[in-house]
Amino acid sequence: NDGYKLWLQYLPFENKAVAEYYRDYLENIVLIGNSPTHSVIQKELEIAIEGFFDMKNKPGINLNPSTALVWIGTEKELSKDILPELQSQINQLGDEGYILKYLHGKVIVTAKGNAGLLYGTFALLKQIQTREKLENLDILENPKIQLRLLNHWDNLNRTVERGYSGFSIWNWHRLPHHIDQQYIDYARANASIGINGTSITNVNANALVLTPEYLEKAAALADAFRPYGIKVYLTARFNAPMMLDNLSTADPLNPEVQDWWKKKTAEIYSYIPDFGGFLVKADSEGQPGPHNYGRTQADGANMLADAVKPFGGIVMWRAFVYNEKTPTDRIRQAYDEFKPLDGKFRDNVIVQVKNGPLDFQPREPFHPLFGAMSETPLMMEFQITKEYLGQETHWVNLATMWQEILQSDTYAKGKGSTVSKVLDGSLHEYKLTGIAGVSNIGTDRNWTGHHTAQGDWYSYGKLAWNPDSDIQKIGQDWLKMTFSTDSDFVKTAQGIMNQSYETLVNYMTPVGLHHIMARSHHWGPGPWVTGGERDDWTATYYHKVTKEAIGFDRTENGSNALAQYAPEWKAMWGNPETTPLEYLLWFHRVEWDKKLSTGNSLWDEIALRYQKGVEGARWMQSEWTKMNGKIDEERFSHISSFLAIQVKEAEWWRDACLLYFGQFSGIPLPAGVEAPKHDLNYYLNFKRNFVPGI
Ligand code: BDP
């Protein structure tokens, strides 16, 4: 098993009894109605049946209503006899919601629209994949967030920015004529977890994608995804009018520029009638933007919003904006720039904010914009690809980190004002709600490099559907569908997943350290990185180590980034004594010999946590060894070899960071911390010029 089928393995039933139980249902399905989505539903049922049963005893789908035990149809298509009993529940459905219910000996899957019907069918198949009984079914689901997107940072030459799983799956050269099966399987996987949009090009945008040659290709993808309820979005390079048509300016207040975007947008809609809209990175890391013309982010976003408005499109404007010149504290920038613009954006603009104020670090506090923009809808941007978290060779269950962020309390409207409530719109009554995940997939046969990184794609989709979902249940379902329903396996693998995030934070950036990765590629340790193009792209800017102390003072004595948070957080995080150790060096400069709540000095705490991280990685490896024979050999060994890489790299992180910081603290390693294998020079020179990735 090479993992290509992701969580849609439809693993064979374990024994005859299980097979017979589900056989009755699976061979008596009636699917009512006709549409491209109905065809993909029928196809999916066939694929599932093929997987569940062995070839010889495979049931066919019997579409005879008189004997049907499973009814699949939208509200309009459902039999008149069933409808009245479901009416009150149907009334609670939104456009994409579904009902999955056992009623008078029959399983009913229904929805208002086709996408809901497809989601409901996948929900039914999930019940069977996880071997749940069907007689108790009584599920009514509506997505809590409207826009549930993947963001691909894919370039037109098929390299993937921060992609570690091969090349881009979009084969521009063969499009529009060849629709690869992988596009269809991509759409199936996304629909099965409720993802309804995809931005297919890098935020560091190439204007060429807006030319007819590429629009025709993007349209072919949009056509392929449409039956699966997935819309296509494109990244817009802010100076495209200059690059493509030689306009002398891209000033958003210039009528000629505005007109250019209106015409361009109309052209896009002529290719893709249900085009979702634009995703924009402006005034950030070399991308052009409204700053170039002395205009605000709102001026820029509104110009594009006006262009897509007549067609029902939206603009996702990223808040990852930071100055051309290094500021005193980079993490303040997005808030300082966007907060004054609250309420100044058009109603079809949504501002896309990364989970933390810096940049996808292993651990950051939630971004202070969440809760601070009551008049402007905000959407979340999570990074599924593990740019700063081991780059697809480390097993880290990202759902743990995402849950920590989603359940963080902004206190915007008192206790319980969680980030998840900002995102689902309930806190500020946003009309537009959304979430984006920077995709981790590529041409690797298993899509995501590490087999377990498929689980991050899966759990992202589930949390996008409902940011308050139980991540333990998500993890169990994913394991059962992907690998095995064996309870021992599920328990052990979930045990590993539950430890994995804290383990990684410990061996990479414990006690609130951040941005200490190697320069530019961000793989491996680089606490010594200093100098160069800009100070805020170094490690020393963030840890500010000296012989006396380490950490970034973000209290009012320092950068005062803390002022961007609610008073409850200011009180807690403003005082090193009450700051949880997870964020200590994020907010404070602390002396090496300072005694912490654990009873250890700061230096000992850092060293012991690095050691704990290494031990955690070894524990994950030894737990996994016990799974030998529980799943197929191919995926078992693949994961085993990656765990060996993880252990080695955890040791590398520990040794390099402790040797480097130890020069400053001057304190020996505490008992229990293993001596580094090499001297500091070795790590300084180690693979210095090696850039991993594709
Ligand atoms: C950083 C990445 C860079 C991205 C940037 C972004 O290093 O490649 O372009 O984020 O989000 O984390 O725009």
Image (cartoon, rainbow, N blue to C red):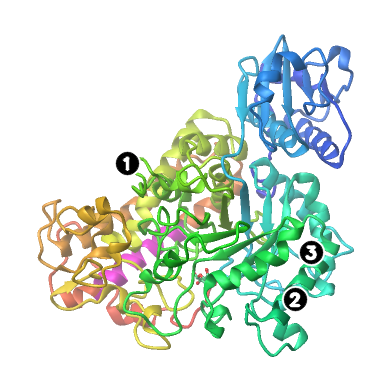
Q: How crowded is mark 2: few (under 14 residues within 10 Å), some or many (20 or more)?
A: some
Give how far across and how far down residue 547 sits, in percent. 15, 78
Amino acid bearing label 3: Ala
Q: Residues within 10 Å of mark 3 (few under 14, many from 20)?
A: many
- Alpha-carbon distance for marks 3 and 2? 23 Å
Q: Residue at x 70, y 76 (%)?
A: 258
Camera-side residue of 693 and 13: 693
Q: Residues within 10 Å of mark 1 (few under 14, many from 20)?
A: few
Q: Is residue 299 visible?
A: yes
The residue furthest top is 104
Position of 556 with respect to 143 (left or right) is: left
Q: Is residue 210 magenta?
A: no
Position of 676 with respect to 140 (left or right) is: left
Ligand 1 closer than 8 Å to label 1 CB: no
- The disc, 2 or 1, on the residue closer to the chain's N-terminal end is 2
**The magenta segment:** 644-660
Which residue is labeled 2 in the image?
A: 259
Which disc is residue 218 wearing?
Answer: 3
Foreground label between 3 and 2: 2
Which residue is labeled 1 in the image?
A: 415
Q: Which residue is drawn at 67% across and 16% down?
A: 102
